[in-house]
Image: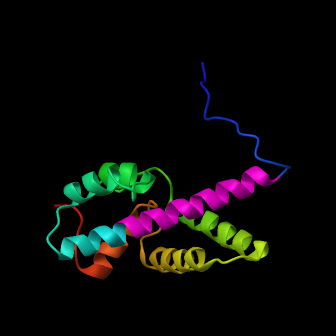
Amino acid sequence: MIGALGTVYRVGPAGAGHALKALNNLLSAVNLAAVAEVMLAGRAFGLEPAAMLEVINASTGRNHASQTKLPDHVLSGTFDSGFALRLMLKDIRIGTSLLDSAGGPAAFGHACRQLWEKAYDELPEGADNVEVVRWLENASGRELRA
């Protein structure tokens, strides 16, 4: 028997779900890159990754990246969340296009897109989306895995 793959949400007219998926993944990408940058800065000050995540996740900075992606797929060293970087970048590009068409501010979205595009160009083909953290580690000269 096949079980449910997720929850169905009615979010608006035809196409609205596609837009929300791309915008949600753009936000997820921003969060992952931001958590990694903050934690890499913390490493420069001698902070331990597990301790940083414990505090972040008990505070206002918590998000899916800090609660799941970093502990399960980065600190473990597996970098295997099961979602390809190329697919995340596709959604980031769709998301920034939607931001642009909405006519509002898009500074974070475009900065995120530039970062992920550079990582995509430099990482191996088929890289998982959490590999962006390894790319940021290389750029900083520090690792998050203790």
Q: Is residue 45 left or right of residue 55?
A: left
In the rendered image of this protein, does residue 124 appear above or below residue 12? below
Tell me which residue sits at (53%, 80%) in the image. 111
For the image shown, how many numbered marks are present on the structure? 0
The rendered magenta stretch, by its main secondary structure, is classed as helix
Q: Nearer the viewer, residue 14 or 78?
A: 14
Residue lying at the far top of the rendered structure: 1
Q: Position of residue 11 (x, y in %)?
A: 76, 46
- Whether residue 49 can be seen here: yes
In the rendered image of this protein, does residue 119 appear above or below residue 79? below
- Whether residue 126 can be seen here: no
What quarter of the picture does the N terminus occupy? top right
Tell me which residue sits at (43%, 63%) in the image. 32
Q: Position of residue 61 (x, y in %)?
A: 39, 59
Q: Is residue 82 magenta?
A: no
Tell me which residue sits at (50%, 74%) in the image. 116
Q: Is residue 145 left or right of residue 100?
A: left
Numbered range of the magenta stretch: 15-35
Q: Nearer the viewer, residue 64 or 116?
A: 64
Q: Nearer the viewer, residue 52 or 85?
A: 52
